[in-house]
Amino acid sequence: EAPFQLVLGGRTVRGRIDAVYATDEGGFEVVDWKTGRTPADPVQLAIYRLAWAELRQVPLDRVAAAFYYVVDDRVVRPDDLPGRDELSVLVTA
């Protein structure tokens, strides 16, 4: 687990990223493990992705993100995760 603290829209967001893997392309993939079957919120995953990019000081486009649903042994990679500007608006709405 990787702890993080991130300021979005004037609010401090804290959390722990379950896992991060290096990719063959020289980037990273943030993975959030889910133990249930309920669809997860992609905003949470987008925050983890942004936090990792900023922690490692790499461009956001070098960080992929996925949910891993343990019960179903299934990986879901949401398309079009929001970036910093969009997340700042979402967390203050």
Image (tube, rainbow, N blue to C red):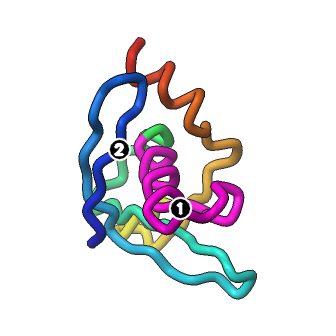
Looking at this view, name the residue that lies furthest to the bottom: 24
> Which badge, 1 or 2, is on the more N-terminal residue?
2
Query: Which residue is at a point 59% across and 29% down the rendered structure image?
Result: 85
Give the SS element for disc 2: strand
Q: Is residue 66 magenta?
A: no
Residue pointed to by mark 2: 6
Q: Quadrant of residue 65?
A: bottom right
| Image spot of residue 41 (x, y percent) | 43, 39
Residue pointed to by mark 1: 66
Is residue 9 depicted above or below 69 in this figure? above
Label 1 packing within 10 angstroms: few (<14), some (14-19), many (20+): many
Q: Quadrant of residue 69?
A: bottom left
Is residue 10 depicted above or below 39 in this figure? above
User: Spatial distance from mark 1 to mark 2, Cα to Cα?
Assistant: 20 Å
Left or right, 16 with reference to 33: left
Segment colored magenta: 44-65
| Image spot of residue 72 (x, y percent) | 42, 68
Please tell me whether mark 1 or mark 2 is closer to you in this view.
2
Give the camera-side residue of 6 and 25: 6
Q: Quadrant of the C terminus?
A: top left
Give the camera-side residue of 49 and 7: 7
Identify which amino acid the numbered label 1 is placed on: Ala
Query: Which residue is at a point 27% across and 72% down the rendered structure image?
Result: 1
Is residue 42 depicted above or below 18 in this figure? above
Give the camera-side residue of 79 and 10: 10
Identify which amino acid the numbered label 2 is placed on: Leu
Q: Which mark is residue 19?
A: none
Query: Which residue is at a point 33% across and 63% down the rendered structure image?
Result: 17
| Image spot of residue 70 (x, y percent) | 36, 70
